[in-house]
Amino acid sequence: MSDQQRDNFTVLYEIAQRINQILDEEQLLEEVLETAMSHLDAERGYIVMANPADKRGFNVVVSKNFSTPKAADESAASSSVINEVFTSGKPVLTFDALSDERFEASRSIVAQQLMSIICVPLRIREMTTGAIYLDSSRSRGKFNDESLKFLAVFGNLAAVAVENAQRYDRLRSENDRLKSEVSSTNLFPGIIGKSKPWKGALDLVQRVVDTDVSVLITGESGTGKELIARAIHNQGRRRDAAFIAINCSAIPEQLLESELFGYKKGAFTGANSDKKGLIEFADGGTLFLDEIGDFPVALQAKLLRVLQEREIRRLGDVESRRVDVRIISATNKELRSEIKEGRFREDLYFRLNIVEIHLPALRDRSDDIPILANHFMKKAAETHGRGVRKLSSGCMSGLLKHPWYGNVRELQNVIERAVVLSRGDELTEDDLKLERYSEEELVQSGMTLEDFERKLVEKTLSETGGNRTRTAEKLGVSLRWLQYRLKEWGGDAK
């Protein structure tokens, strides 16, 4: 290995360490350009990024040593080098641009007496997303084949870093959007209820918001577990950082590891570049793991390491990375039973459950049903442009009698459907079209909770014609949970 190659390798290693820490896209691109020009001793340079809204297909985002930003933009607009790189997706190197047959027709090269030019694409998954352009008018042969190799590798590193910065910016924007939807007029905006069980849960929430302890939120499906998790984040010390939510039952087990922990280039077929996982994107903020009871046993040790050591290891990597993330998890399962059955690690349970917040079922906080129903009615009427203004006494009576196995989520869906289909300004009990569950039909003397659960599932399956997806939706549970239960019971519904 030559001294030049060794120097290039050292610089690339230092660059990779530095630019992967920068999450502001503009700052990152300025650092990339500064590093490229300094290492290759270029006189001028700029970086262009693809922009479908621009008729040229790109625009200059950062430049250096041009008289004005406009001058850099005009140079890029007339540059046959940039056009060739974007068209071919391949780097361009010319030792003597004035004598290079490829650019005889380029007015900008002749006008500016450019001698040496080097330009490499920024590529992600076979798509050119931008380009780094450097030139010199002082000497021929300013850039050579070693320069091209260096800048090409550097360009790949930069492209990955830019994608990470853009992804982080999108996540931050989404987080800001979600926070802006919530009024700041009270401590837990958007969280409605005055019943004693609900106030008890909120009292615990208030006690943990300004700490970093792991919180386990328990309760039936539809009780508002993610809403509480967001409230803890939005009112806590991490409110200005990312809130990343992931449903552990919604992502196939074989994909969950790479989504959470990320991966190194070459870790598996299709891993063409390094990728940060959601845990790294949540660094400094909060990671919400919904349906934690469905977290695969094979990955539980890795999650335990995050909680104990505050570090992660990407798939295919040999190095660990430090992370500062608060973990809030939620489940509708009885995790102690899962531990006994060998489906959940006891040490992980205790790490996740520093503080447990149990959210009561809606049938156990019936005082809140009128408040919630009126809130959802007004919201639905405004959203769908309906003239509904009130709930009839019969309607309210029906709401109070209903068992609400789907909890608040079911109540919201029922009210919204009734508002959309209503013809008047008052909702009636007939508008609700509530499912009828008779006690004689569902409950028998001596029946265990598991017996009741099975009977309710079987009845709902029968009502949906055996459709598992619709059954899971009506019961407010995950499809994975339903399939597991049916397998456990020897169910054969389709």
Image (tube, helix red, strand yellow):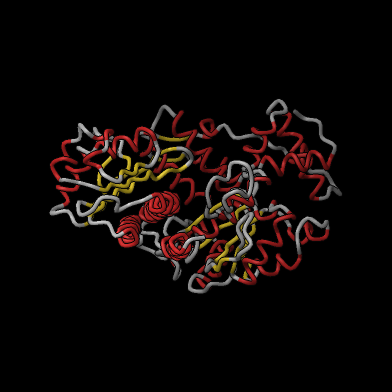
Observer-nearest of 381 and 234 = 234
Q: How many marks can you see?
A: 0
129 left or right, relative to 275: left
Position of the C terminus, as image quadrant, is top right
149 left or right, relative to 275: left
Which quadrant of the structure image shows residue 443?
Answer: top right
Location of residue 240 in the rendering, given as x and y in whole percent from the top left corner: 40, 64
Residue at image location 61% in from the left, 61% down from the top: 313
282 left or right, relative to 450: left
Residue at image location 79% in from the left, 60% down from the top: 339
Residue at image location 39% in from the left, 43% down from the top: 378
Q: Is residue 86 depicted above or below 9 in this figure?
A: above
Observer-nearest of 223 and 19 = 19
Residue at image location 64% in from the left, 32% down from the top: 470
Location of residue 177 in the rendering, given as x and y in whole percent from the top left corner: 37, 51
294 left or right, relative to 226: right
Which quadrant of the structure image shows residue 409?
Answer: top right
Location of residue 493 in the rendering, given as x and y in whole percent from the top left corner: 77, 30
Q: Is residue 350 depicted above or below 466 in this figure?
A: below
Observer-nearest of 75 and 441 = 75
Q: Is residue 162 visible?
A: no
Location of residue 481 in the rendering, given as x and y in whole percent from the top left corner: 71, 44
Q: Is residue 77 visible?
A: yes
Observer-nearest of 135 and 428 = 135
